[in-house]
Amino acid sequence: MTQINAYIRFNGNCREAMTFYKECLGGELTMQTVEGTPIENHMPANAKKNILHSTLVKDNLVLLGSDMTGPEGLQRGNGISLCLDCSSEEEIYSCYEKLSAGGLATHPLEDAFWGGKFGDLVDKFGNSWLLNYSKQQ
């Protein structure tokens, strides 16, 4: 089923924040660092312990977080993205095309190392979107 979740970006304190949210909300928290992933060798040494992706799940609640930001760094307005998990490859392409119309296709859809399709964009209203389709669904 298509679903939308909040994706919060942090400035190096994702682990601390997501742990805090877990303490407040309960649920199961998973975190993946930059270290040990295919992008590790493209990152500065001080970024290897940063959180590439984290997920807090409790029942229907899904909160996502990361220390990863674009080259502009963390700025007011880019701290939260809407993450759209699509249910098919056709759907992700359709949504990406429609949402990016009049906006900025910042990261075109491509195969991701975790076995899915991924891309991001800023819509014509200035909102950041992350689109994902996991082929294992």
Image (cartoon, grey):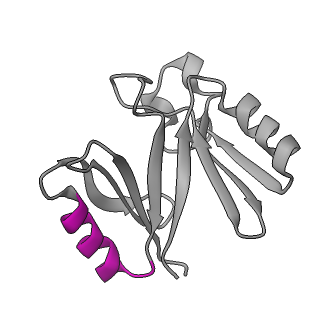
Q: Can you tell which quarter of the image residue 27 is in?
A: bottom right
Q: Is residue 81 left or right of residue 103?
A: right
Q: Which residues are magenta?
A: 87-99
Question: Quick check: 1 above or below 20?
Answer: below
Residue drawn at point x = 30 percent, y = 60 percent: 110
In magenta segment, residue 96 = yes
In the displayed structure image, the side of residue 115 where residue 64 appears, left or right: right
Q: Quadrant of the C terminus?
A: bottom right
- The prevailing secondary structure element of the residues shown in magenta is helix
At 56% across and 23% down in the image, what residue appears?
A: 11
Q: Position of residue 19 (x, y in %)?
A: 80, 38
Most extreme residue toward the top is 46
* Direction from residue 110 to residue 8 in the image, left or right: right
Q: Considering depth in this image, is 42 or 100 the residue closer to the camera?
A: 100
User: Which residue does the image show at 55% across and 59% down from the upper left?
Assistant: 5
Query: Residue 94, percent across and down?
Result: 24, 75
Q: Residue at x 82, y 50 (%)?
A: 25
- Residue 114 lies within the magenta run: no
Name which quarter of the figure residue 132 lies in: bottom left
Image location of residue 43, percent across then percent down:
46, 26
